[in-house]
Amino acid sequence: MNLSEIISGIEDVDKDFLDRARERTDQLVMPQRALGELHVIGEQLCGILRTLKPSVKKKAFLVMAGDHGIAASGVSAYPQVVTGEMVKTFLGGGAGINVLSRLEEAQVMVVDVGIIPDIPEQTGDGGRLLVRKIARGTQDFSQGPAMTRDQAESAILEGFRAAKALFHEGVEIIGTGDMGIGNTSASAAIGAVMTGTPVAGITGRGTGVDDEGFQRKCETIGLGIKRNAPDPKEPMDVLSKVGGFEIGAIAGIILAGAYFRKPVVIDGFISGAGALIAHGLCPATSDYVFAGHRSLEQGHGIILEYMGLRPILNLDMRLGEGTGAALAMHIIEAGACIIKEMLTFEEAGVSQA
Amino acid sequence: MNLSEIISGIEDVDKDFLDRARERTDQLVMPQRALGELHVIGEQLCGILRTLKPSVKKKAFLVMAGDHGIAASGVSAYPQVVTGEMVKTFLGGGAGINVLSRLEEAQVMVVDVGIIPDIPEQTGDGGRLLVRKIARGTQDFSQGPAMTRDQAESAILEGFRAAKALFHEGVEIIGTGDMGIGNTSASAAIGAVMTGTPVAGITGRGTGVDDEGFQRKCETIGLGIKRNAPDPKEPMDVLSKVGGFEIGAIAGIILAGAYFRKPVVIDGFISGAGALIAHGLCPATSDYVFAGHRSLEQGHGIILEYMGLRPILNLDMRLGEGTGAALAMHIIEAGACIIKEMLTFEEAGVSQA
């Protein structure tokens, strides 16, 4: 299946099930919609899954890993070697996403879509690794395009295929995660171009650059946008010129969610940039997406607002890896349980207002 | 044990463990404190539990139920009979708190500290009922004191004992819940008196009164405060004059948490009023308390801020029963898991910034 076939196979969330879900909520044994956002979440799941008994019990995280040429420009507080080291940590089970996915009883699959080192495919205590390397890192986008158009499409398709395989295994909800030193720079560039926000307004400290590093980061991103002149109306142009392999792969996961009518929970800034690409290719995808949290990274809120997504959590997190998606997935499951299991006034025999 | 013995047995959270927990967080394999509030939560648990390996796996909810004389003044959208009907619904397992506590794998214990109808002690699909009735509802506080001073102390002691029994069974964390038609009026009165906020600024719509009902509710609460003139510096005076049995019992749960050095998660506005009473009796209790969420009820934020508590969730909920505490308990457990299970840079062999 190619990208245009995928996009043409995506349909809107089912309005009839959304309406029927809202009717059910109105009858539940409590003051009208007294569980607030939990109802919105549960109803959205009904519309996505075409059922009034939504289940999101079987959970998985797809952590997309890729390296970035832009890291050579000194935009990160950490050396590039950390990307591969963290992939190994994920497989060992000692990283933040491992801890939180264990709590969610969710599997973790890491996909190497373009890290520099070679780490063989394997299953560790912390999860599985798939190697789908598109290249050993992107090119430095401050000097020219990050990748070719073909590579950008491949990145999206690898994300789509990985998600498709999980859905076919019976996974009911996927959380997106990322690893890639330099990827807040690529995400800021995508966000700046696609939402029309000035670079300084959407760029953050990432893993924690100092003032001088932040200045350099903004200048480097600005230079990259100027040199490459990506077309905001052409998401594939934006992704290939200033994006990253893992960002494209995250866009692919979201397309798969919409195509296979399954919910996808996005994590922070990098997942948000992936969602922007998917949204640009097919705006209907956003109705299949839950925004797990609002990250401390200043551009994240801008990106979510642009897509009309309300973050579920706001806990000053900024780690990535899928950690914000992991915590939110529990709240999403709670939304499913409420609409599925709570009694109505009539069923409970309770007097109404 | 009487109230003053309990209070004199409460000690501050352990500063040494707090410091050691922060040192551990600083070494975890991620950018400095990149999981934001999860670290604050995990460290607080270390200080409460005097350990660097905090566990909050074994969870319970204590739902305190009581009726309110003030309901006769037409301050609620629902008839008073709903209090008892909802207690039956809790025992049957079909209410919001049942759905969410099943998801948390937490037990539910309902305590009748003063509802009007007689419902025998029993264990249902949804939880256990203890009958510790102090009276068949409070008196209408717009006409005189809601209860006697002895009844107020009894309410607190019943909450303390119920929590003590659960802690002795091995429960590691308790969420507070409430049921009682009219109890947002009592909570608003407590909040107004103890935080010094005008009645109209702290009173909300409760279960959903209309404009006329809201006007009447504010006037009734104002009248009650004027007639009873509770002393803001005397929490027992406030509780007895304008409070409720379930609110006193919630204060007792919080005192038990602090006394037995266990965390307590408070729910919404009514639990917040209970926490205010506990805070007034012993300010150190607040360090043992997590604010599960910020409710839509307008006074809730004022109460939390007064006690210096940051709500974990903000999902426009306003149901009570312990539902906000239930959702937040999962985030609290995540905070415990992060500090306990995540590797350090050194353990993971990852390069530092």
Image (cartoon, coloured by chain):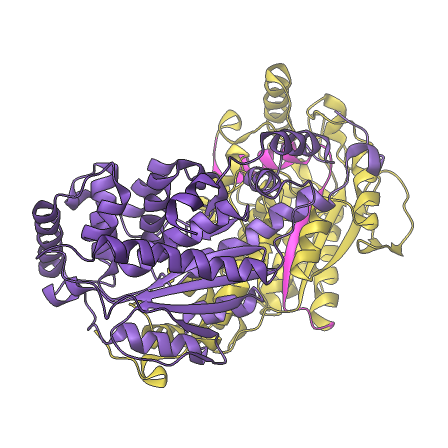
Chain colours: A purple, B yellow
The residue at the point 56 percent across, 51 percent down is A331
Of A350 and A164, nearer the camera is A164
Question: Count the marks: how many?
Answer: 0
Please state if A228 lies on the left or on the right of B118 as rendered.
left
Of A277 and B94, nearer the camera is A277
Q: Is residue B191 magenta?
A: yes
Q: Is residue A226 above or below residue B288?
A: above
Q: Quadrant of residue A47?
A: top right
Whole-percent x, y for residue A275 in the image: 37, 47
Whole-percent x, y for residue A157 in the image: 38, 56
| Residue B11 visible in rendering | no
Q: Is residue A46 above or below residue A87?
A: above
Please state if A165 lies on the left or on the right of B353 as rendered.
right
Which image quarter holds the C terminus of chain A? top right
The residue at the point 34 percent across, 50 percent down is A274
Of B289 and B134, nearer the camera is B289
Whole-percent x, y for residue A112 in the image: 35, 69
Q: Is residue B335 magenta?
A: no
Whole-percent x, y for residue B230 in the image: 60, 36
The residue at the point 72 percent across, 21 percent down is B74
The residue at the point 56 percent across, 39 percent down is A44
| Residue B252 visible in rendering | yes
Q: Is residue B327 above or below residue A49?
A: below
Extreme residue in the top direction: B212
Q: Quadrant of residue B73?
A: top right
Of A208 and B97, nearer the camera is A208
What's the magenta region? B169-197
